[in-house]
Amino acid sequence: MRQFLTFSLNDEPFAMPITQVREIIEFPGLTEIPMMPAFLRGVINVRGAVVPVIDLAVRFGRKETITTRRTCIIILEMEQPTGPLQLGMLVDAVNDVLDVDPGAIEPRPTFGAHIRADFIAGMIKRDERFVIALAIEQILSGDELAGLAALQESETA
């Protein structure tokens, strides 16, 4: 079995492997950084570390996430050639954790998902709906991650 954290963006369900999730925090507000890509909403301080926060909705080509009392930041830890990178993802709400048999994950659709196909790892059937399982490592290109790692290092120094 594999575990997936499920969350919502614009009332659509998404999931990501729980192995990449370090923690989930309430939306604390952000410090904006000028001249950054639109999907990079700013940075937050997590126990003394500067963590860049991306707005998944903007990354998917949608409008900026409007923060509410349920808005959360999912803190991920991603391996980079220079070492681990902490990254926050702004989402409307975190829902629950699913235990999924890997054989029950359907292949990604070739059309109609409202986001780029390479962002999708597969489709998890839940009740009568599908939950899009994201390929987190594809959501940001290597160059974008390297830029975020450099930002994190410069802000921490």
Image (cartoon, rainbow, N blue to C red):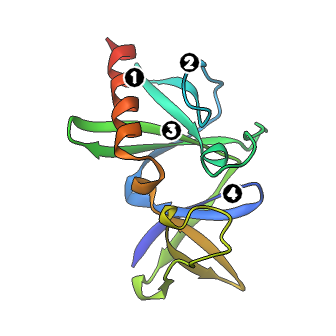
Callout 4 amino acid: Ser
Q: In which quarter of the image is residue 71?
A: top right
Say which amino acid is labelled 2: Ile
Given residues 112 and 8, the one toward you in this image is: 112
Q: Mark 1 points at which residue?
A: 151
- On-image quarter of the N terminus: bottom left
Q: How crowded is mark 1: few (under 14 residues within 10 Å), some or many (20 or more)?
A: some
Closer to the observer: label 1 or label 4? 1
The furthest residue to the top? 157
In-front residue for pair 52/35: 35
> Which residue lies at the image location 37% right of the left edge and 58% below the top edge?
19
Residue occupied by mark 3: 88
Q: Residue at the spot x=22%, y=37% of the render?
A: 83
Q: How far apart are marks 3 and 1 (CA)?
A: 13 Å
Which is nearer the N-term, disc 4 or disc 2?
4
Height in image: 73 above or below 136? above
Q: In this view, does 137 lie above or below 144?
A: below
Q: Mark 4 points at which residue?
A: 8
Q: Of the residues under marks 1 and 2, which one precedes in the sequence?
A: 2
Circle 3 SS class? strand
Q: Is mark 4 on a helix, strand or loop?
A: strand
N-terminal of the pair, mark 2 or mark 3, is 2
Crowdedness of circle 2 by 10 Å Cα count: few (<14), some, many (20+)? few
Rendered image quadrant of residue 150: top left
Q: Where is residue 155 in the image (x, y as percent from the top left)?
A: 40, 15
For residue 33, which numbered disc appears in the image? 2
